[in-house]
Amino acid sequence: MHPIHDVDVLLLMATALASKRRAAELAEIMAAADLLHGSIPLDVDMAAAFLRLSTNGLISEEAGRFTLTPEAMEFMAGVPRKRKAEPAERLLAIKQELAGYAPKVEGTAIRLATETVSAAILAHRTFLKGPGRNMLVPKPKAAVDKAKRPGQWRKLDSGRRSKH
């Protein structure tokens, strides 16, 4: 698969992250890309990446949702995983593996209109501004004061009762 674009690698990893349990909607893939990269590439670039990866048999579409093909899952399993690897390191490892990838069978092309990708990006950004929380973003650790323990402040003596 030549040439390898950075957007292709980001889209492949974002699709893998967003579609772990079920096929992901386009807005979920954009949320994963935002989480991994800190920003979302242009809608034109994302639409072109969908076309490239789908024709190479790495991404498939099922009823408007996207997932990795079994061949792509096998490919992603071959990418070395480091326990504490930064997303940039993982993206570089995927790019190196993708450089040596040769598709066995040509996949069905997914042609997304740039308006569709723009709408998904806008939906993700609107969701972030709303009261909801992006489920792909890791939750911050709660700051625990070691001097104070959670729980009951004082123990009540049930044997004593006031007399009136």
Image (cartoon, rainbow, N blue to C red):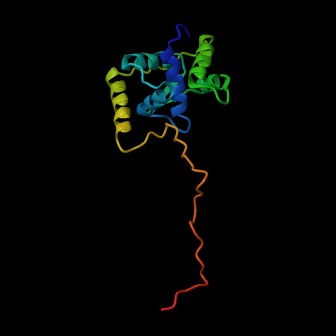
Q: Nearer the viewer, residue 55 or 4?
A: 4
Q: Nearer the viewer, residue 103 or 2?
A: 2
Q: Residue 62: image x %, image y %?
A: 47, 32
Q: Nearer the viewer, residue 37 or 115?
A: 37
Q: Residue 133: image x %, image y %?
A: 43, 42
Q: In the rendered view, would you say 18 is above or below 109? A: below
Q: Residue 79: image x %, image y %?
A: 65, 22
Q: Residue 162: image x %, image y %?
A: 52, 87
Which residue appears at 52% of the width and 34% of the height? 19
Which residue appears at 50% of the width and 15% of the height? 6
Q: Nearer the viewer, residue 82 or 94?
A: 82
Image quarter in which the N terminus is found: top right
Q: Quadrant of residue 83?
A: top right
- Left/right placement of residue 122 relative to residue 60 reads left
Which residue appears at 51% of the width and 27% of the height? 36
Residue found at the far top of this picture: 3
Q: Quadrant of residue 128?
A: top left
Count of labels in the image? 0
